[in-house]
Amino acid sequence: MNYWLMKSEPDEASILDLERAGTLPWTGVRNYQARNFMRDGMQLGDGVLFYHSSCPEPGIAGLAEVCSVAYPDATQFDVKSPYYDPKSKPEAPRWLHVDVRWHETTRLLSLKEMREAPELAGMQVLQRGNRLSITPVSPTEWRAVLKRLKA
C-alpha cells in the first residue's frame, strides 16, 4: 500500500465536496511528474491525505483512498474546460486521472502545524519550492499525520 498527499483548491473540490459525492475524479492535473505518480505509482486502496491549497489556511482536511486505476482525463479534450490541452488527442491522451473515495473529514492539520512537527520535516509538501499537486507520503509520515489528526 502506498500513501499520497493530493492538493485541491477548496473552491474547486473540497473535502466536503468529496464527502457529499462519495467519489470524485481527480481531474485537471497538468504536471508530468504528478501524472506519472497516478499512472505508475497509485494502486487501488492507496491512502490519500486530502490537502486544501491556495486558500486562507492550507492544510490536510481529510482522508481518502484511490479507488480507480489511472485513465484519460476527459477535461483535456473539452475546449470549454480550463484544463483543455489542444495538443492532447483522444488516441494519444497526455493527461490521466484517478478517482478518489472519501474516507473521513478531519480537523484541519494546518501547514503551520505540519511545519512545526519534526517527524514531518521530510514531507515533500513542506520542501521549499514544491508545487506538485500530488506527492508520495512515507508510511512513517502517514502514521505521524494520523496521530496528529487524532490528537
Image (cartoon, rainbow, N blue to C red):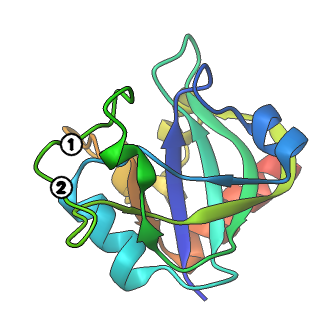
Q: Position of residue 119 (x, y in %)?
A: 53, 59
Separation of residues labelled 2 and 1 (CA atoms): 6 Å
Asked if the residue at tag 1 contacts the one at tag 2, i.e. Cβ–Cβ closer than 8 Å, the answer is: yes
Whether residue 56 sits left or right of residue 78 in the image: it is right
> What element does badge 1 sit on?
loop
* Amino acid under disc 1: Asp
Whether residue 3 sits left or right of residue 22 in the image: it is left
Name the residue furthest left.
Answer: 87
Q: Is any atom of residue 85 visible in this view?
A: yes
Identify the mark at residue 85; answer none if there is no mark: 1
63, 143: nearer the viewer: 63
> What element does badge 2 sit on?
loop
Residue at 81% x, 33% y is 16
Name the residue furthest bottom.
Answer: 1
* Amino acid under disc 2: Ser
Q: Position of residue 111 (x, y in %)?
A: 53, 32
Q: Position of residue 130 (x, y in %)?
A: 25, 43
Q: Is any atom of residue 123 visible in this view?
A: no
Q: Which residue is mark 2?
A: 88
62, 69: nearer the viewer: 69
Whether residue 72 sits left or right of residue 21 in the image: it is left
Quadrant of the snapshot with the N terminus: bottom right
